Image (tube, rainbow, N blue to C red):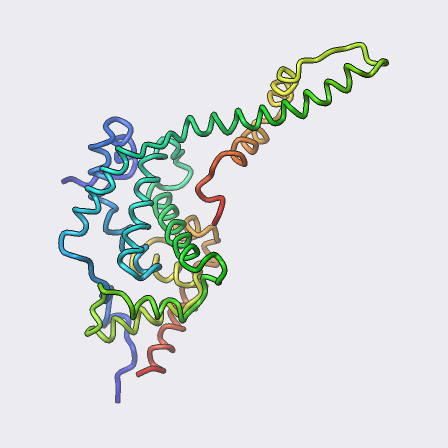
Amino acid sequence: MATLNDSELVAALKEDTERGFRLLMAKYKEAVYWHVRRLVVSHEDAQDAAQETFIRVLLSFRQFKGESSFAVWIYRIATNEALRLLKRRRGGRVSLDDPEAGTNRLMADEYVDYSDLEAVKLQKAILSLPTKQQLAFNLRYYDELGYDEIAAITGSTAANVKANYHIAKEKITKYINSTT
Amino acid sequence: MEKEFDFNRIGKRMPYTTPEGFFNKMEADIWERSRHEPLKPARRKTSRLRTVLIGTAAVAASITLLLVLNPFSSGQADGFSKVEQAFAGLSQEDQDYMLEVYQEDIFINR
Protein backbone atom coordinates (compact mmCIF):
# COMPACT_ATOMS: atom_id res chain seq x y z
CA MET A 1 0.00 0.00 0.00
CA ALA A 2 1.40 3.37 -1.03
CA THR A 3 2.27 5.72 1.79
CA LEU A 4 0.75 9.15 1.38
CA ASN A 5 2.02 12.38 2.82
CA ASP A 6 0.04 13.69 5.77
CA SER A 7 -2.14 16.20 3.92
CA GLU A 8 -3.10 13.51 1.41
CA LEU A 9 -3.80 11.21 4.34
CA VAL A 10 -6.13 13.72 6.00
CA ALA A 11 -7.87 14.31 2.66
CA ALA A 12 -8.27 10.55 2.20
CA LEU A 13 -9.81 10.25 5.67
CA LYS A 14 -12.29 13.00 4.86
CA GLU A 15 -13.23 11.51 1.50
CA ASP A 16 -13.45 7.85 2.41
CA THR A 17 -12.96 7.02 6.08
CA GLU A 18 -12.21 3.33 5.60
CA ARG A 19 -9.62 3.91 2.89
CA GLY A 20 -8.14 6.75 4.94
CA PHE A 21 -8.07 4.52 7.99
CA ARG A 22 -6.15 1.80 6.13
CA LEU A 23 -3.63 4.37 4.93
CA LEU A 24 -3.38 5.88 8.41
CA MET A 25 -2.66 2.47 9.90
CA ALA A 26 -0.15 1.59 7.20
CA LYS A 27 1.79 4.73 8.04
CA TYR A 28 1.37 5.08 11.79
CA LYS A 29 0.25 1.91 13.56
CA GLU A 30 3.73 0.58 14.28
CA ALA A 31 5.22 3.98 15.06
CA VAL A 32 2.44 4.78 17.53
CA TYR A 33 2.49 1.34 19.13
CA TRP A 34 6.27 1.42 19.67
CA HIS A 35 6.16 4.99 20.95
CA VAL A 36 3.59 4.15 23.62
CA ARG A 37 5.22 0.79 24.33
CA ARG A 38 8.47 2.50 25.26
CA LEU A 39 6.53 4.64 27.73
CA VAL A 40 4.09 2.18 29.27
CA VAL A 41 6.35 -0.87 28.81
CA SER A 42 3.78 -3.67 29.03
CA HIS A 43 2.39 -4.98 25.76
CA GLU A 44 -1.21 -4.95 26.99
CA ASP A 45 -1.02 -1.35 28.13
CA ALA A 46 0.65 -0.33 24.86
CA GLN A 47 -2.12 -2.08 22.94
CA ASP A 48 -4.77 -0.19 24.93
CA ALA A 49 -3.04 3.17 24.54
CA ALA A 50 -2.43 2.66 20.81
CA GLN A 51 -6.05 1.65 20.24
CA GLU A 52 -7.34 4.65 22.16
CA THR A 53 -5.03 6.88 20.14
CA PHE A 54 -6.36 5.69 16.80
CA ILE A 55 -9.98 5.78 17.96
CA ARG A 56 -9.46 9.41 18.98
CA VAL A 57 -7.72 10.20 15.72
CA LEU A 58 -10.54 8.59 13.75
CA LEU A 59 -13.22 10.39 15.65
CA SER A 60 -11.66 13.81 15.67
CA PHE A 61 -9.59 14.11 12.49
CA ARG A 62 -12.20 16.56 11.15
CA GLN A 63 -11.17 18.91 13.95
CA PHE A 64 -7.54 18.75 12.89
CA LYS A 65 -6.85 22.31 11.77
CA GLY A 66 -3.31 21.85 10.53
CA GLU A 67 -1.83 24.10 13.21
CA SER A 68 0.82 21.43 13.68
CA SER A 69 1.75 18.57 11.38
CA PHE A 70 -0.57 15.57 11.39
CA ALA A 71 2.29 13.43 12.71
CA VAL A 72 2.79 15.80 15.64
CA TRP A 73 -0.96 15.74 16.34
CA ILE A 74 -1.02 11.93 16.36
CA TYR A 75 2.08 11.64 18.54
CA ARG A 76 0.62 14.16 20.94
CA ILE A 77 -2.58 12.16 21.31
CA ALA A 78 -0.55 8.96 21.70
CA THR A 79 1.68 10.52 24.35
CA ASN A 80 -1.37 11.76 26.26
CA GLU A 81 -2.97 8.33 26.11
CA ALA A 82 0.19 6.64 27.36
CA LEU A 83 0.66 9.10 30.23
CA ARG A 84 -3.02 8.96 31.11
CA LEU A 85 -2.87 5.17 31.23
CA LEU A 86 0.22 5.21 33.44
CA LYS A 87 -1.45 7.67 35.78
CA ARG A 88 -4.57 5.50 35.95
CA ARG A 89 -2.48 2.40 36.68
CA ARG A 90 -0.99 4.24 39.64
CA GLY A 91 -4.34 5.42 40.94
CA GLY A 92 -3.49 8.99 40.00
CA ARG A 93 -1.46 9.30 43.19
CA VAL A 94 2.12 8.53 42.33
CA SER A 95 4.35 10.73 40.20
CA LEU A 96 4.97 9.52 36.67
CA ASP A 97 8.64 9.91 37.40
CA ASP A 98 9.05 6.71 39.33
CA PRO A 99 12.13 4.83 38.10
CA GLU A 100 11.30 1.68 40.09
CA ALA A 101 7.85 1.39 38.53
CA GLY A 102 9.23 1.38 34.98
CA THR A 103 11.77 -1.32 35.75
CA ASN A 104 9.14 -3.41 37.53
CA ARG A 105 6.85 -3.24 34.52
CA LEU A 106 9.74 -4.25 32.26
CA MET A 107 10.63 -7.26 34.38
CA ALA A 108 7.00 -8.39 34.66
CA ASP A 109 5.97 -8.29 31.01
CA GLU A 110 5.48 -11.44 29.00
CA TYR A 111 6.55 -9.88 25.71
CA VAL A 112 10.14 -8.96 26.47
CA ASP A 113 13.23 -10.74 25.21
CA TYR A 114 15.24 -10.88 28.41
CA SER A 115 18.12 -12.66 26.64
CA ASP A 116 19.07 -9.40 24.92
CA LEU A 117 20.80 -8.02 27.99
CA GLU A 118 22.14 -4.88 26.39
CA ALA A 119 18.72 -3.90 25.00
CA VAL A 120 17.06 -4.61 28.35
CA LYS A 121 19.64 -2.49 30.10
CA LEU A 122 19.11 0.40 27.69
CA GLN A 123 15.37 0.34 28.32
CA LYS A 124 15.94 0.21 32.08
CA ALA A 125 18.21 3.24 31.75
CA ILE A 126 15.56 5.10 29.74
CA LEU A 127 12.87 4.19 32.26
CA SER A 128 15.00 5.58 35.07
CA LEU A 129 14.74 9.06 33.51
CA PRO A 130 12.11 11.70 34.32
CA THR A 131 9.21 11.62 31.87
CA LYS A 132 10.27 14.75 29.96
CA GLN A 133 13.73 13.33 29.37
CA GLN A 134 12.26 9.96 28.36
CA LEU A 135 10.02 11.68 25.83
CA ALA A 136 12.81 13.84 24.44
CA PHE A 137 15.13 10.87 24.14
CA ASN A 138 12.61 8.40 22.68
CA LEU A 139 11.10 10.78 20.16
CA ARG A 140 14.52 11.91 18.97
CA TYR A 141 16.47 8.66 19.11
CA TYR A 142 13.84 6.16 17.98
CA ASP A 143 11.37 8.28 16.01
CA GLU A 144 13.96 10.72 14.62
CA LEU A 145 11.67 13.71 15.10
CA GLY A 146 13.00 17.26 15.07
CA TYR A 147 13.39 19.22 18.30
CA ASP A 148 10.62 21.59 17.22
CA GLU A 149 8.29 18.68 16.52
CA ILE A 150 9.05 17.12 19.90
CA ALA A 151 8.48 20.50 21.53
CA ALA A 152 5.04 20.70 19.87
CA ILE A 153 4.21 17.20 21.11
CA THR A 154 5.34 17.76 24.67
CA GLY A 155 4.25 21.39 25.03
CA SER A 156 7.82 22.55 25.54
CA THR A 157 10.37 24.57 23.60
CA ALA A 158 12.89 23.24 21.11
CA ALA A 159 15.75 24.47 23.32
CA ASN A 160 14.33 22.64 26.32
CA VAL A 161 13.84 19.46 24.34
CA LYS A 162 17.40 19.65 23.03
CA ALA A 163 18.74 20.08 26.55
CA ASN A 164 16.59 17.21 27.84
CA TYR A 165 17.78 14.97 25.01
CA HIS A 166 21.45 15.56 25.72
CA ILE A 167 21.01 15.20 29.48
CA ALA A 168 19.10 11.96 28.86
CA LYS A 169 21.89 10.59 26.67
CA GLU A 170 24.50 11.37 29.29
CA LYS A 171 22.46 9.82 32.07
CA ILE A 172 21.81 6.68 30.03
CA THR A 173 25.51 6.26 29.28
CA LYS A 174 26.38 6.73 32.96
CA TYR A 175 23.64 4.34 34.08
CA ILE A 176 24.76 1.59 31.72
CA ASN A 177 28.48 2.02 32.39
CA SER A 178 27.86 1.97 36.13
CA THR A 179 25.92 -1.30 35.96
CA THR A 180 28.32 -3.30 33.76
CA MET B 1 36.76 -5.52 31.18
CA GLU B 2 33.36 -4.57 29.68
CA LYS B 3 33.31 -2.16 26.75
CA GLU B 4 31.94 1.36 27.25
CA PHE B 5 28.33 1.69 26.19
CA ASP B 6 27.98 2.79 22.58
CA PHE B 7 24.64 3.92 21.14
CA ASN B 8 25.83 2.99 17.64
CA ARG B 9 26.37 -0.61 18.68
CA ILE B 10 22.82 -1.13 19.92
CA GLY B 11 21.08 1.23 17.50
CA LYS B 12 17.29 1.03 17.75
CA ARG B 13 17.19 -2.56 18.95
CA MET B 14 14.65 -3.12 21.72
CA PRO B 15 13.87 -6.12 23.87
CA TYR B 16 10.13 -5.63 23.41
CA THR B 17 8.18 -8.15 21.35
CA THR B 18 4.56 -8.57 20.29
CA PRO B 19 2.35 -11.62 19.74
CA GLU B 20 2.27 -13.11 16.23
CA GLY B 21 0.01 -11.13 13.87
CA PHE B 22 -0.55 -8.45 16.49
CA PHE B 23 -0.53 -5.39 14.23
CA ASN B 24 -3.10 -6.79 11.80
CA LYS B 25 -5.34 -7.77 14.69
CA MET B 26 -4.96 -4.34 16.28
CA GLU B 27 -5.97 -2.69 13.00
CA ALA B 28 -9.03 -4.94 12.69
CA ASP B 29 -10.02 -4.32 16.33
CA ILE B 30 -9.74 -0.55 16.00
CA TRP B 31 -11.80 -0.46 12.83
CA GLU B 32 -14.47 -2.68 14.40
CA ARG B 33 -14.56 -0.54 17.53
CA SER B 34 -14.75 2.71 15.62
CA ARG B 35 -17.83 1.41 13.80
CA HIS B 36 -19.61 0.44 17.00
CA GLU B 37 -18.64 3.28 19.26
CA PRO B 38 -19.07 6.33 17.11
CA LEU B 39 -18.57 9.54 19.05
CA LYS B 40 -19.74 12.72 17.44
CA PRO B 41 -17.30 15.41 18.46
CA ALA B 42 -19.00 18.10 16.40
CA ARG B 43 -22.37 17.43 18.06
CA ARG B 44 -20.74 17.16 21.46
CA LYS B 45 -19.16 20.57 20.90
CA THR B 46 -22.56 22.06 20.06
CA SER B 47 -24.05 20.41 23.10
CA ARG B 48 -21.33 21.88 25.32
CA LEU B 49 -21.90 25.28 23.79
CA ARG B 50 -25.60 24.92 24.46
CA THR B 51 -24.84 24.01 28.08
CA VAL B 52 -22.66 27.09 28.45
CA LEU B 53 -25.27 29.32 26.87
CA ILE B 54 -28.09 27.88 28.96
CA GLY B 55 -26.04 28.22 32.14
CA THR B 56 -25.10 31.78 31.30
CA ALA B 57 -28.68 32.48 30.28
CA ALA B 58 -29.92 31.29 33.67
CA VAL B 59 -27.65 33.80 35.39
CA ALA B 60 -28.71 36.50 32.95
CA ALA B 61 -32.36 35.62 33.49
CA SER B 62 -31.92 36.01 37.26
CA ILE B 63 -30.35 39.41 36.74
CA THR B 64 -33.13 40.31 34.33
CA LEU B 65 -35.73 39.28 36.90
CA LEU B 66 -34.11 41.59 39.43
CA LEU B 67 -34.14 44.39 36.91
CA VAL B 68 -37.80 43.73 36.12
CA LEU B 69 -38.71 43.83 39.81
CA ASN B 70 -36.75 47.01 40.24
CA PRO B 71 -39.31 49.86 40.32
CA PHE B 72 -36.74 52.28 38.99
CA SER B 73 -36.17 50.16 35.95
CA SER B 74 -38.41 50.55 32.96
CA GLY B 75 -36.87 48.10 30.53
CA GLN B 76 -37.33 44.37 30.09
CA ALA B 77 -34.90 42.09 28.49
CA ASP B 78 -34.88 38.62 27.16
CA GLY B 79 -32.14 36.61 28.94
CA PHE B 80 -31.33 34.50 25.93
CA SER B 81 -31.06 37.39 23.53
CA LYS B 82 -28.90 39.23 26.07
CA VAL B 83 -26.60 36.24 26.26
CA GLU B 84 -26.53 35.96 22.52
CA GLN B 85 -25.77 39.64 22.27
CA ALA B 86 -23.11 39.36 24.93
CA PHE B 87 -21.56 36.35 23.20
CA ALA B 88 -21.69 38.08 19.83
CA GLY B 89 -20.06 41.10 21.42
CA LEU B 90 -17.04 39.07 22.49
CA SER B 91 -13.95 39.18 20.38
CA GLN B 92 -13.29 36.16 18.15
CA GLU B 93 -10.48 35.24 20.51
CA ASP B 94 -12.78 35.29 23.56
CA GLN B 95 -15.47 33.33 21.74
CA ASP B 96 -12.90 30.74 20.77
CA TYR B 97 -11.70 30.65 24.37
CA MET B 98 -15.24 30.04 25.66
CA LEU B 99 -15.74 27.22 23.20
CA GLU B 100 -12.33 25.78 23.91
CA VAL B 101 -12.76 25.78 27.69
CA TYR B 102 -16.10 24.05 27.67
CA GLN B 103 -15.32 21.64 24.93
CA GLU B 104 -13.97 18.30 26.04
CA ASP B 105 -10.47 18.93 24.88
CA ILE B 106 -8.43 15.79 24.78
CA PHE B 107 -5.38 17.60 26.05
CA ILE B 108 -7.05 19.33 28.93
CA ASN B 109 -5.92 16.73 31.48
CA ARG B 110 -2.27 16.54 30.47
Q: Give x and y (percent) for residue A75.
A: 35, 48
Q: Give x and y (percent) for residue A70.
A: 34, 41
Nearer to the camera, A99 or B88: A99
- Residue B32 relative to residue A67: left or right: left
Identity of the residue drawn at 32% across and 32% down: B38
Q: Quadrant of residue A90?
A: bottom left
Q: Give x and y (percent) for residue A149.
A: 39, 50
Nearer to the camera, A172 or B49: B49
- Residue A98 relative to residue B92: left or right: left
Residue A127 versus residue A50 in the image, above or below:
below
Residue A180 versus residue A173 in the image, above or below:
below
Identity of the residue drawn at 38% across and 29% down: B40
Nearer to the camera, A171 or A123: A123
Identity of the residue drawn at 61% across and 23% down: B87
Q: Which residue is at the far bottom?
A: B1
- Residue B58 relative to residue A122: left or right: right
Q: Quadrant of the N terminus of chain B?
A: bottom left
Q: Give x and y (percent) for residue A147.
A: 40, 55
Q: Which residue is at the far right?
A: B72
Residue A36 versus residue A55 in the image, above or below:
below
Q: Quadrant of residue A128?
A: bottom left
Residue A102 versus residue A4 in the image, above or below:
below
Labels in figure, total? 0
Q: Quadrant of residue B95?
A: top right
